[in-house]
Image (cartoon, grey):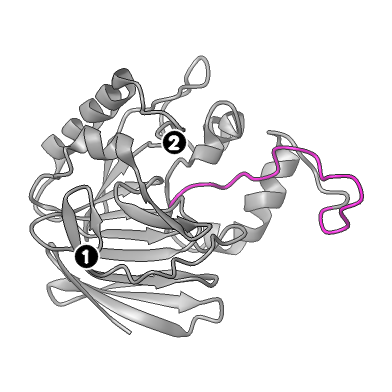
Amino acid sequence: IIHLGDYFYRETPCPEGNIGCEGSPSGDNWESWDADFFSSAAPLLKSAPWAFTRGNHESCARGGKGWFHFLDPNPPFPECEEFTPPYVLETGLVQLLMLDTSGAEEGEQDAPQDLVDAYTVQIDALSEAAGDNAWLVTHIPFWAIGESDGELFTINDILQRASGNSLKEGINLVMSGHAHSVELLIFEGDRSPQFVFGFSGTKLDPPVTVPLTGLEIAGAVIAQGVTFDDFGFVTMEQVDNGWDVTVRNVDGEEVFKCVIIGDFAECFN
């Protein structure tokens, strides 16, 4: 089971008079983490191995204490770390290249060069470790499109600059969360597909109303773009020399399907 980050949402107390969250715990403590994640995920936690991705909600200023106490795979750090080392999970089916992008949030101004440099080093390290059947797993997408008040915006300049918008051959997919929706982007040329699965944890983002196919992100045209703006989850099943990727609603019913064969991907409504 791959979780793409953001486990912790109860940072601040429930607003007075809000009956929807009245009595809810808050703060970076066991009670909040249990209410947000561990109680609801208990059956799944017992069912299969997990790969945990650190989200921006688990940054040091938010839920970092709980992240490092409960889920971070590294030996204990003396204090909260903004950047943790990338690592590789060999699943026997596909290589998972785990990249901590919790610090790659974009603000109104361009990111400092030292932040871009830090992610460049980490991406290069994962590229060195990657074989010919790898997926890059990271909370914040390298390439995605959102819409706010009728205006489109792209994600994420920091990671685009750090990667040079090109990943090593053999990194066949970038899988991310962060955006509260589903967005599957397959590009013209040799850029790896970007799949965003962020439709399980909290209130969804406004849907992108503009067709994604034909739009450009960071110099590459989207050959096929598919979105879904309801809650659900994804199953990925190895079939022959590729993968069937099925986006499902909360009842487990198929919404649409994609296939991945190497770095080739295609989706079907």
Q: Amino acid at mark 1?
A: Ile
Q: Which residue is mark 2?
A: 105
**In which quadrant is the N terminus drawn?**
bottom left
In the picture, the quarter occupied by the C terminus is bottom left
Q: Secondary structure at mark 2?
A: loop
Question: Residue 247: percent from the left, percent from the top?
Answer: 40, 75
Element at badge 1?
strand
Check the image and report above or below for 51 versus 259: above
Q: Earlier in the sequence, mark 1 or mark 2?
A: 2
- Image quadrant of residue 192? bottom left
- In front here: 256 or 78? 256
Q: Position of residue 92 (x, y in %)?
A: 22, 57
Asked if residue 64 lies in the magenta stretch, the reply is no
Horizontal side, residue 194 vs residue 130: left or right: right
What amino acid is labelled 2 in the image? Glu
Q: Position of residue 120 (x, y in %)?
A: 22, 29
Q: Vertically, is 209 above or below 53?
A: below
Q: Name the image quarter holding residue 99.
A: top left
Q: Check disc 1: other Cα within 10 Å, few if <14, some if 14-19, many if 20+.
A: many
Q: Which residues are magenta?
A: 4-21
Image quarter for residue 239? bottom left
Q: CA distance from mark 1 to mark 2?
A: 23 Å
State left or right for residue 86 relative to residue 41. Answer: left
Q: Is residue 7 magenta?
A: yes
- Left or right of 136? Residue 19 is right
- In the image, 78: left or right of 84? right
Q: Residue at x 14, y 45 (%)?
A: 167
Neighbours of disc 2 within 10 Å: few (<14), some (14-19), many (20+): some
Residue under label 1: 186
